Image: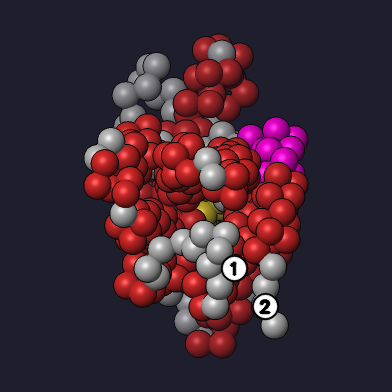
Amino acid sequence: MQLSVPTLLLAELFVLILVGALMLVAWRGGRREPTLGYLGAVQLIGALATLIISLRAFELVTPAVVLGNTLMMLSYGLLWTGMRRFAGREASVLGICAGAGLWLLACLWPGFMASLPLRVKFYSLLAVIYCLLAASELWRSQRALEVTLWPSLGLLLFNACFYFVRLLFDPGLPSEASTGIEATFFAVLVFETLLVSVGMAFTTLTMVRDRAELKLRVAALSDPLTGIGNRRAFMEQGERLLRLCAEREEPVALLVCDLDNFKRLNDSFGHPAGDRALLEFSRITASRMRRQDVFGRIGGEEFACLLAEAGTEAACQVAERIRREFAELPFIGEGVLSVSIGVVTSEHGGYRLAHLLALADQALYRAKAKGRNRIELSAPGPESEGRV
C-alpha cells in the first residue's frame, strides 16, 4: 500500500495545530507549567514549518529549505528546552537558537544549498543531537522528578534513532517526480514526525499531571510552615513503622513534645517570633532524627517523634538533647524558649500508635505540671524517673 504524501502532510498540519493549541490552553488554564508552553510552541512552529516546506511543490525551494528547516530546528530547540525546564533547569536562549542559527549559516554556503544529500545529513545530525540532549535532561533528573519518564524517553530516543538511520541511508528528500523507495521513505518520514509529535504532547501532559498530583499529595502531608510532615503524615508513616517493628519484635519509642508558654511568646513578641520558634524546634529535632524515624507536627505547637529500634535509655538521650539544644538557642532573651517532652516505649505501651500517643500525652501533662522544660516517662519507676 502506497502512502499519499500530500494527504499525510495535510493530516500532519491539522494535527500539529490542534495539539499545539490544546497544549497552550492547558498551559494557560493550569498552573502555567512552562513545559506545556514550550511543547505547545513546538507543535505550532512545527506546523508553520511544515506549511512552508510544502511550498517545494510550487517550486519555491529556497524559502522551503531556508525558512522551513530553520523553523524546524527552532522547534527542536524548544523541545529540548521544554524537557530542560521540566527537569528544573533554566531555559537557554543560546541552546534554543543554536540549531536554527547553524542551519541559517550553512544556507549561506552555495555548495550546501546545491547539495540535497548534504542538507539531509546536516538536518538529521542536528535532530539527533537535540533529541539526545532532551532525553539526557530527563535521564539525569529521573530520581528527583519521581514521575514516569519512560514513554517520553522512548519517543525521544526513537526519533533520534530514526534520524540517525536517515543520516546514514537517506540520499535526500524526493521531488514531486520521485517514485519508489525514496517517495515511500519521505512518506514514512512525515508519518514518523506526526506520531512523535502527538506522542510527545500526550506523554508530556501525563508527566506534568503526575507531577502536579505528586505535589498535591506532598502538600497534603506537609506542614506549610515547617515543611515537616503534618499530623496525617505522621499517623500514616507511624503506623507503617510500628507494624514493621512489631513484625521484627524491635523496640520503638515515642516522644511527644510541646513548646512551653507558646501563647505568651506570641502575645509578647508577635507571631513572627512564634513562627521562628517553631521553625527552630523543627530544625533541631529533625537533625536528631535518622532516616528510619518519623517526625511530624501534630498540633499547633505540638510535635511527635517515633524512634525505631529505641528503648527507654536511647529515647531519653534523644529527648534530652532536643530539650537542651532548644533551650540554649540565642533567641529573643534567655529562658524564653523551652519544651516539655513525654516519652513512652513499646515495652510499656505496645505497638498501637493511638495508645502510645495517649500514654505520651499523659507523661507530657505531668512534665507541664512539674514546672515545664523537662522530660517525663510514661511509666516512671526506679530506673525511669522524670528528668529535668
Residue 220 image position (x, y, % from top left): 68, 48
Residue shown at 74% from the left, 50% from the top: 14
Residue 187 image label? 1
**In this view of the protein, can residue 100 be seen by the observer?**
yes
Q: CA distance from mark 2 to mark 1?
A: 9 Å
Height in image: 337 above or below 47? above
Residue shown at 64% from the left, 70% from the top: 239
Quadrant of image for the N terminus: bottom right
Residue 161 image position (x, y, % from top left): 41, 72
Q: Quadrant of residue 352?
A: bottom right
Residue 2 image label? 2
Depth order, front residue of 153/323: 153
Q: Is residue 97 magenta?
A: no
- Magenta segment, prevailing SS (helix, strand or loop): helix
Residue shown at 68% from the left, 59% from the top: 6
Tally of numbered tags: 2
Q: Which residues are magenta?
A: 20-32
Residue 145 image position (x, y, % from top left): 49, 56
Height in image: 8 above or below 333? below
> Disc 2 or 1, which lies upstream in sequence?
2
Height in image: 324 above or below 132? above
Depth order, front residue of 229/78: 78
Depth order, front residue of 174/135: 174
Q: Secondary structure at mark 1?
A: helix
* Amino acid residing under circle 1: Ala
Height in image: 363 above or below 77? below
Q: Is residue 23 magenta?
A: yes
Do callouts 2 and 1 mark residues in contact (Cβ within 8 Å)? Answer: yes
For residue 144, side relative to residue 349 (left or right): left
